[in-house]
Amino acid sequence: MGKKKYNEGCELDMTPMIDVVFQMIIFFIVTIKMDENVNEDIKLELAKEGPLYKDPDPTTIVVEVDRRGWISINNLALSEQQLGNIIGGRYRRLGKTFPIMIRADKNAQHKDVRKVMDICTAQGLWRIDFAAIKEPVGR
């Protein structure tokens, strides 16, 4: 019995398969839900008489102020200057049309929340919202 000769020119091109895998990875990274980036230690104030906040604008920057006065975005602690740089960069890219959401702990001091408001005002922003809860949690 003789050995069969295989055609040496026959190869399987893996490039399309690798392209599809990379596209799927990018898709899952982009569509991942980012709700876990909020600080669970922040207890929001009760506000029964406000509009219900649904489906926020994707350009919204959520700035958190905890009870110690620390400022953060996506659980990343920031100085006042860093926050100003982030907001200023977004302002240069989008103009003053993007909203800011301030999530302040109910025990945070007003002066700490005011710092965030002053930074936004210094950048020329006017769309500032405050997060609160409509009903007490845990009842």
Image (spheres, rainbow, N blue to C red):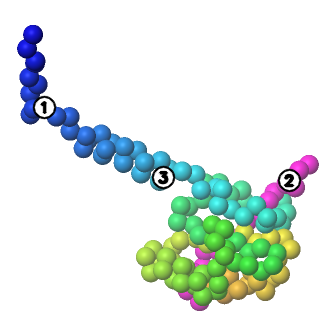
Mark 3 or mark 2, which is nearer the start of the sequence? Answer: 3
The residue lying furthest to the right in this view is 139
Say which element carries label 2: loop
Does the magenta run of residues contain 15? no
Q: Amino acid at mark 1?
A: Cys
Residue carrying label 2: 137
Residue 61, image x and y in percent? 59, 70
Quadrant containing the N terminus in the rendered view = top left
Q: Which dot marks residue 10?
A: 1
In depth, the one of 15 and 129 nearer the eye is 15
Residue carrying label 3: 29
Q: Quadrant of residue 100?
A: bottom right
In depth, the one of 78 and 126 nearer the eye is 78
Assess disc 2: are there few (<14), some (14-19) or many (≥20) residues with their C-alpha within 10 Å of its C-alpha: few
Say which element carries label 3: helix
Label 2 to label 1, Cα distance in Å? 65 Å
Q: Quadrant of residue 80?
A: bottom right
Q: Are marks 2 and 1 in contact (CB under 8 Å)?
A: no
Closest to the camera, between mark 2 and mark 3, is 3
Residue 99, image x and y in percent? 58, 70
Mark 1 or mark 3, which is nearer the start of the sequence? Answer: 1
Residue 59's place in the image compared with 2, above or below, is below
Residue 50 makes an appearance in the image: no
Q: Which dot marks residue 123?
A: none
Mark 1 or mark 2, which is nearer the start of the sequence? Answer: 1
Q: Amino acid at mark 2?
A: Val
Which residue is at a point 44% across and 81% down the rendered structure image?
92
